[in-house]
Image (spheres, helix red, strand yellow):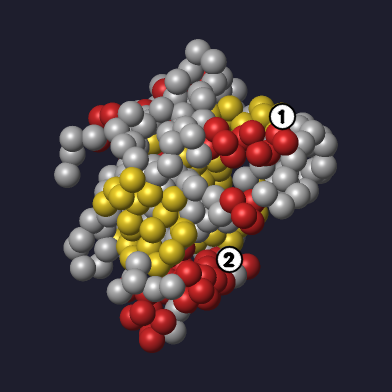
Amino acid sequence: MSYQHIEVKPVAGRIGAKILNLDLSNHLSDEIIKEIRQALVQYKVIFFRNQQLDANGQVTFARRFGEVTTAHPTVPSFTGHPEVLDLNYGKSAARANNWHTDVTFVDRPPLGSVLRALVIPPAGGDTIWANSVAAYQDLPTHLRHLADELWAVHSNAYDYAEAAVNLSEQLKAYRNVFTSTVYESLHPVVRVHPESQERGLFIGGFVRQIRGLSTTESDDIIRLLQSYVTRPENTVRWRWQVGDVAFWDNRATQHYALADYGDQPRHVQRVTIAGDLPVGINGKHSEAIKGDSSAYTPQLAAVG
């Protein structure tokens, strides 16, 4: 792909690129926005260094790519900014240190997320993204055919027998908020990207069970498929600096925020762009099983 209005520099071999010499606080032309979106679909996650955005500017930038959701289906938003999820990590804070795709427990997960770095520890606190399209392409033919047929239930509910072990009171309180409304959705394990038509593995940390299989069978198959997503060659690791902005395609990636910085502060803010109903290779769409997420994506509630 060629770019006439932005300068794009790949960061890793299969995923990730930096967009150079662009000030996101400026009003960007439609041509620049179109090429940023093109780079997002091509590279799955794109990075902008040395930005001077505030929360309003972050929301304004995100809105150039679609409707913006509320901050989260269950977690409260940043004061005064209903679209902003404030992730202020410090001592004993709850941290999402697992592989996941954002908010897949609702029927219309986000198109993408825009994350802004406010405070970064001097060492640690990196984020890793994985290319789920490359993972699908890596599958042996017989595993690909198996994955094509599978549908999985995603939920924000935890296995509480497992979760109760060695959890701090703060983390227990956070999980109580996170699951204050339980959502379940049925998604294809192989999702067709609505813009590129690429096929990718649509799994991650909110998968609870493959439809029609036992918990043990589901766990074994998901573990096998997930191992292809997180192969080092399918990932990119970003060393944050204050002012950085990362924008990832939630339809074609997973990510993992590393909790390797001890009690040092790490403060980031996230805005998410509303997505559509995922579709499998057979043309069938995802469906909600439990929970009404229309307040999270109100503009899309009546679509489809």
Q: If you read the primary sequence from the N terminus, does the residue marked by circle 2 or circle 1 appear first? A: 1
The kind of residue on which mark 2 rests is Thr
Q: Which mark is residue 88?
A: none
Q: CA distance from mark 2 to mark 1?
A: 27 Å
| Pick the front one: 279 or 161 | 161
The relative height of residue 238 versus residue 302 in the rendered view (above or below) is below
Q: Which mark is residue 230?
A: 2
Residue 125 sits in quarter: top right
The relative height of residue 283 versus residue 271 in the rendered view (above or below) is below
- Give coordinates of residue 253: x percent, y percent: 47, 55
Tell me if 94 is positioned left or right of 131 in this view.
right
- Give coordinates of residue 248: x percent, y percent: 48, 46
Residue 245 visible, this angle: no
Residue ID at (72%, 45%): 167
Q: Quadrant of the C terminus?
A: top left
| Pick the front one: 290 or 57 | 290
